[in-house]
Amino acid sequence: MTDLLDRRKALHRRIEDAQSRCVHIEEQMEQIQPLAALGLNWAMTAHEMNNLLMPIGNYARLAIANPQDGPLLQKSLDKILKLSERAALVMEKVMSIASPAGGKKECHNVGELLDDVFLCIGRDFAKDKIHVIRQMSQPVHVFAEKISLEQVFLNLILNGRQALLGRGGVLTITAEPRDEQVSIEISDNGPGIDADHLSHIFDPFFTRGKQNGKGLGLAFCRKIVEAHGGCISVESQVGQGTRFRILLPKETL
């Protein structure tokens, strides 16, 4: 009987020790989580900055290679200035946008946001044998923070372009109102994504094989869309292409 009581006491002590360790671990996790979020946000900021710095470098090289071409030089300098100003805004906003509070949201025309995005990309997709189709039967508006939503579009459009490079194809962008939401779809008819990868596509730092990138662009997109009270999803079939769908609140008139 005494031996049984001793074993019970020892078991209770082990349970108490385990509970105490769990509490300690939970306290440590609470301390670490803000640092992890900060690191992820800065990683996302670096990713977005890279999307803007690459065309800045391309325009600068174009200007250096053609110093006697006045109109081309002026165009390149204008693009560099616009992209630099945009980069400054991204640095200012990404950290706050990635938090649930987000930035200031206003009514924006989706078509005009896309115009800005393609202007920032500064690349004629036709040169890569990519045909861009934009389908909007009427002006479509969303209630959003301009810079952050444009970065979402930029990421998805560049992803589509990357999928079609070297093979050509069609990149399709559609936007239409649906009840209290706006549906925006960006799709390509590229190689597609297999099911195993598709379930992790929005996970931070997830990459597919030897594909370029650090696996942050789509994680950034999901954070931004959710901060706007919307949602983002993906459909894909190997050999047929990929479609990203964004649902966002309509503008408030």
Image: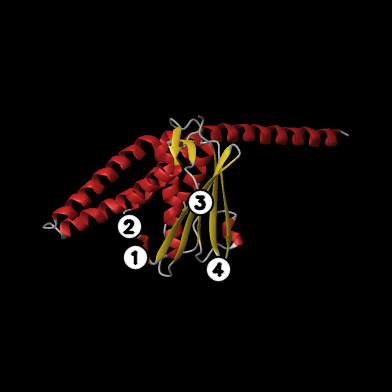
Identify residue for label 1.
127
Callout 3 amino acid? Thr
- Tag 2: amino acid: Arg
Among the two numbered marks 3 and 4 on one chain, the one whose residue lies closer to the N terminus: 3
Mark 1 and 2 residues: CB-CB less than 8 Å, in contact?
Answer: yes
- From mark 3 to mark 1, how far is it between C-alphas? 22 Å
**Where, quadrant-wise, is the N terminus in this rendering?**
top right
The tag on residue 123 is 2
Front tag of 1 and 4: 1
Q: Give the residue at mark 3.
A: 174
Q: Which residue lies furthest to the right in this view?
A: 1
Q: Which amino acid does label 4 sit on?
A: Gly
Tell me if I can see residue 214 in this picture: no
Point 80% across, 34% down: residue: 8
Q: What element carries label 2?
A: loop
| Dot placed on the residue nearer the N-terminal end, 2 or 4 | 2
Distance of mark 2 from mark 3, alpha carbons?
20 Å
Tell me which numbered mark, 2 or 3, is placed earlier along the sequence.
Answer: 2
Residue furthest to the front in view is 137
The answer to which of 135 and 205 lies nearer the viewer is: 135
Distance of label 1 from label 2 (alpha carbons): 8 Å
Residue 246, image x, y percentages: 54, 46
**Which residue type carries mark 1?**
Lys
Q: Which colour scheme is used?
A: secondary structure
Q: Where is residue 223 in the image (x, y as percent from the top left)?
A: 50, 41
